């Protein structure tokens, strides 16, 4: 059979067209952030979105009921068993003088909530790390009564997020929303298993966004504050908007307070879940210094010009990238990568945006003399995250 050949002029035109498409594609990728995005999100939104509620539906409560009904099937009850050391009852002196004698390992039960979401690695349960911390046995119960054994895929104590794998067919999933555009006053619906009352729905509003809260020596930030009731057992369950989308993972309440609960903003959850799935943990950048803002008294005590701006190293961790590079306590950092450093918040935010292996050049003042310090960002040790 005779083969028809393409004329040389058309070949050249075709090749040029392909090259042009390649240039446009690659250029677009770099303009969007320096790299071609391989995937936009680890989450696949399999649950269909709800239509926007009408004013009458909101006023009657129908919109809230509809949103809760859309998410409740994907909300799970989590029962855990942790083995803990307890004094042996054979030694009565333990009850009076503490655990000074023999002890034994006994099971301790715990309970929390979670929500099933669709990811590119299958359907997984999102919950709080503190719900499954140290658990030897995890039981998952769905609204329809089905029970599964859960396996921790990854957990992150720093953000209090954990991912659990369960094996089952036709698992319901919840749709994720966008927490970056939340405004105080919007409806908030908390769903979970407070105090053993399964699949409870409570309603309130978004009280505030971007809250920070200290707990157990850690600083948690980017919390959503809500007055929707959150009680023990709600931890790990979803905070939902009126469109039936998960906007947060309920995590904490303030003891003795009424109407003050907190949820982890879902946008922050999206950022770390892919690492939990792929690596089982979140890899964080680490420089190894404690810093604080430079004030007038510090400037005067260090004998620096009154207009000096920057931050001061209050602590340098042994064996850290900072110590290895030669940083010392009371060094004043004025620039990072040739850009001025004015406060600790901006400095920490910049460090958090980096990854292990990145290079940093710091301009510091030590003994009234400016000098450059070059260091390589490391990976935060696990013990500092616990």
Image (cartoon, rainbow, N blue to C red):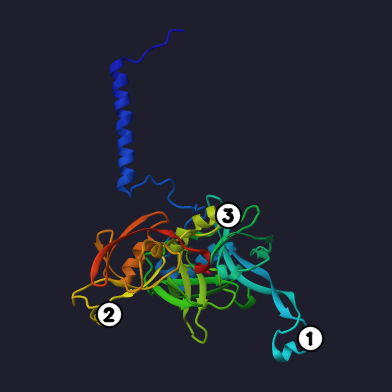
Give x and y (percent) for residue 99.
70, 84
Mark 2, Cα crowd under 10 Å, few <14 / some 14-19 / many 20+, is some
Distance, label 1 to label 3, CA atoms, is 48 Å
**Of pointers 1 and 2, the one earlier in the residue sequence:** 1
The residue lying toward the viewer, choosing from 73 and 41, is 41
Does the CB distance between marks 1 and 2 fall below 8 Å? Answer: no
Residue 74 sits in quarter: bottom right
- Callout 2: SS: helix
Please indicate whether residue 68 sits to the left or right of residue 285 in the image.
Answer: right
Mark sitting on residue 123:
3
Residue 75 sits in quarter: bottom right
Mark 3, Cα crowd under 10 Å, few <14 / some 14-19 / many 20+, is many
- Callout 1: SS: loop
Mark sitting on residue 91:
1
Give x and y (percent) for residue 40.
42, 50
Does the CB distance between marks 1 and 3 fall below 8 Å? Answer: no
- Write the residue at 51% across / 71% down: 250
Q: Which residue is mark 2?
A: 298
Distance, label 2 to label 3, CA atoms, is 54 Å
The residue lying toward the viewer, choosing from 272 and 349, is 349
Farthest residue to the right: give it. Answer: 90
Residue 160 makes an appearance in the image: no
Please indicate whether residue 237 sits to the left or right of residue 59 in the image.
Answer: right
Q: Nearer the viewer, mark 2 or mark 3?
A: 2
Farthest residue to the top: give it. Answer: 1
Farthest residue to the bottom: give it. Answer: 96
**Of pointers 1 and 3, the one earlier in the residue sequence:** 1
Give x and y (percent) for residue 71.
54, 63
Give x and y (percent) for residue 194.
59, 76
- Write the residue at 30% across / 16% down: 8
């Amino acid at each position: 059979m005779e083969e028809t050949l393409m004329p040389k002029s058309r070949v050249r035109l075709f090749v040029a067209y392909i090259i042009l498409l390649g240039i446009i594609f690659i250029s677009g990728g770099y303009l969007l952030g320096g790299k071609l995005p391989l995937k936009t999100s680890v989450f696949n939104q399999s649950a269909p979105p709800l239509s926007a509620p009408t004013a009458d539906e909101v006023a009657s409560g129908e919109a809230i009921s509809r949103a809760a009904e859309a998410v409740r099937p994907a909300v799970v009850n989590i029962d855990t068993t942790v083995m803990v050391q307890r004094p042996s009852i054979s030694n009565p002196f333990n009850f009076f003088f503490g655990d000074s004698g023999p002890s034994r390992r006994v099971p301790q039960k715990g309970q929390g909530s979670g929500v099933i979401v669709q990811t590119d690695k299958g359907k997984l349960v999102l919950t709080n790390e503190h719900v499954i911390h140290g658990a030897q046995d995890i039981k998952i119960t769905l609204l329809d009564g089905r029970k599964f054994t859960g396996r921790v895929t990854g957990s992150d104590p720093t953000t209090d997020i954990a991912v659990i794998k369960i094996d089952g067919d036709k698992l319901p999933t919840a749709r994720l929303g966008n927490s970056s555009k939340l405004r105080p006053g919007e409806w908030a619906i908390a769903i979970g298993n407070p105090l053993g009352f399964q699949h409870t729905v409570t309603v309130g509003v978004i009280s505030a966004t971007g809250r920070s809260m200290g707990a157990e020596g850690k600083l948690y930030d980017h919390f959503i504050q809500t007055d929707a009731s959150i009680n023990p057992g709600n931890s790990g369950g979803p905070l939902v908007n009126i469109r039936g989308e998960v906007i947060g993972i309920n995590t904490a309440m303030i003891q003795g307070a009424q109407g003050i609960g907190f949820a982890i903003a879902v946008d922050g959850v999206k950022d770390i879940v892919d690492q939990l799935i792929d690596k089982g943990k979140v890899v964080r950048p680490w420089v190894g210094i404690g810093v604080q803002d430079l004030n007038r008294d510090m400037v005067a005590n260090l004998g620096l010009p009154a207009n000096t701006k920057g931050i001061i190293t209050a602590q340098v961790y042994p064996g850290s990238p900072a110590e290895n590079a030669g940083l010392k306590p009371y060094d004043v950092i004025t620039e990072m990568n040739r850009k001025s450093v004015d406060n600790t918040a901006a400095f920490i935010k910049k460090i958090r945006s980096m990854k292990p292996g990145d290079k940093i050049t710091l301009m510091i003042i030590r003994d009234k003399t400016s000098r450059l310090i070059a260091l390589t960002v490391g990976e935060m040790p696990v013990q500092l995250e616990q």
